[in-house]
Amino acid sequence: MTILVTGATGSVGRLVAKGLAEKGERVRALTRTPDRARALLPAGVEVVAGDLDEPATLPGALDGVDRLYLFPIAATAREVVELARKAGVRRVVVLSSGAVTGGYDTTFHLPVEQAVEASGLEWTHVRPGEFMLNKLWLWGPSIRAERVVRDPLPDAVMCPVHEQDIADVAVTALLDDGHQGTAYDLNGAEFLSHRDQVRIISEAIGEEIRFERVTPERAREIYRRQGGFAAANADFLLGFKDYDGNEAAPEDNAEIDLSAYGPMPTSEAVLGRAARTFADWAGRHAADFR
């Protein structure tokens, strides 16, 4: 059995490929950057060049593939899934988003889910909430340079999820029966405010990190200067745009508290063990913050 992992150099995709390889599976990794993928992925993972944005690059990568981990690209989802079906793929696990469950995402992840469901293939949707990794991409530069976090919502309470838990659920759904036709919402093990998260990162690196509350406008300036993930997602994460890219008001998202909704679903239902904690994650990434 050959399993194709798309988005194989991404924060979750690389862990999916690694997890499958560790279980002795034959793994093929699709990437736009083969050299980078070979440096990141375990020996024995077959690396092939291809781009989900360009379905014409995919037939060779899909040849002989039985199962597919699908990174979400809405614009080409139907064409990609049809190519997979014609190639003989039987099972697809989609990296989706908890925003689909909440009804906020109608244009990004939802169309990918719908394309897979319409194909007649076995499917499982993995719907994580906020990634713990977001905090490395948003706060990492200022913590490394100044030991400070500048954020507009110190008391916003979320339950961010560990990227390894997301990958472990995807690997389980790819390999084991009993998960087909199911969408799994994944969150972290605990509710934490932004202040709590900064405190835990501080404990992980063994140094004090100052929290400075700033306006959403100031935070947007900071994120745009940082570039990368922070710049690309500043408007959405700070409430200037909604999930579909429409204009929004930051004050509408002020100090959200997910704990008001009660316990949130985690990977424990799939994996049979407690979800990883933010402290686990911060310890794993301590060097990235130093």
Image (spheres, rainbow, N blue to C red):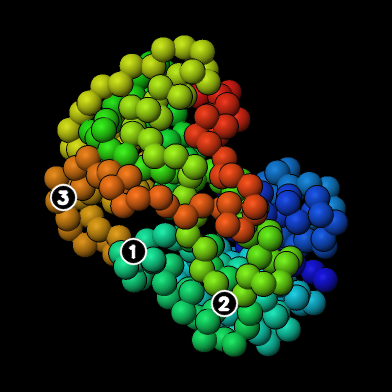
**Residue 91, position in %: x, y?**
67, 76
- Work out whether residue 12 can be spotted: no
Q: Is 84 left, or right, of 112 in this rendering?
A: right
In the depicted view, which residue is nearer to us: 270 or 193? 270
**Amino acid type, callout 2:** Gly
**Amino acid type, callout 1:** Gly
**Residue 186, position in %: x, y?**
49, 54
**Residue 216, position in %: x, y?**
20, 38
Above or below, 235 against 208 in this view is below
Q: Residues within 10 Å of mark 3 (few under 14, many from 20)?
A: few
The N terminus: image quadrant: bottom right
**Amino acid type, callout 3:** Asp
Q: Earlier in the sequence, mark 3 or mark 1?
A: 1
Q: Residues within 10 Å of mark 2 (few under 14, many from 20)?
A: few
Above or below, 217 against 187 in this view is above
Callout 1 secondary element = helix
Callout 3 secondary element = helix
User: Rounded to the nearest whole Å, what is the CA distance between mark 3 and mark 2?
Assistant: 35 Å
User: Rounded to the nearest whole Å, what is the CA distance between mark 3 and mark 1?
Assistant: 16 Å
Q: Earlier in the sequence, mark 3 or mark 2?
A: 2
Indicate which disc residue 262 carries: none
In the depicted view, which residue is nearer to us: 4 or 165? 165
Above or below, 88 against 38 in this view is below
Q: Which residue is found at the position 73% from the left and 43% from the top? A: 39
Q: Is 255 left, or right, of 32 in this rendering?
A: left
Indicate which disc residue 252 carries: 3
Name the front one of labels 3 and 1.
1
- Work out whether residue 119 can be spotted: yes
Indicate which disc residue 181 carries: 2
The residue singled out by tag 1 in the image is 102
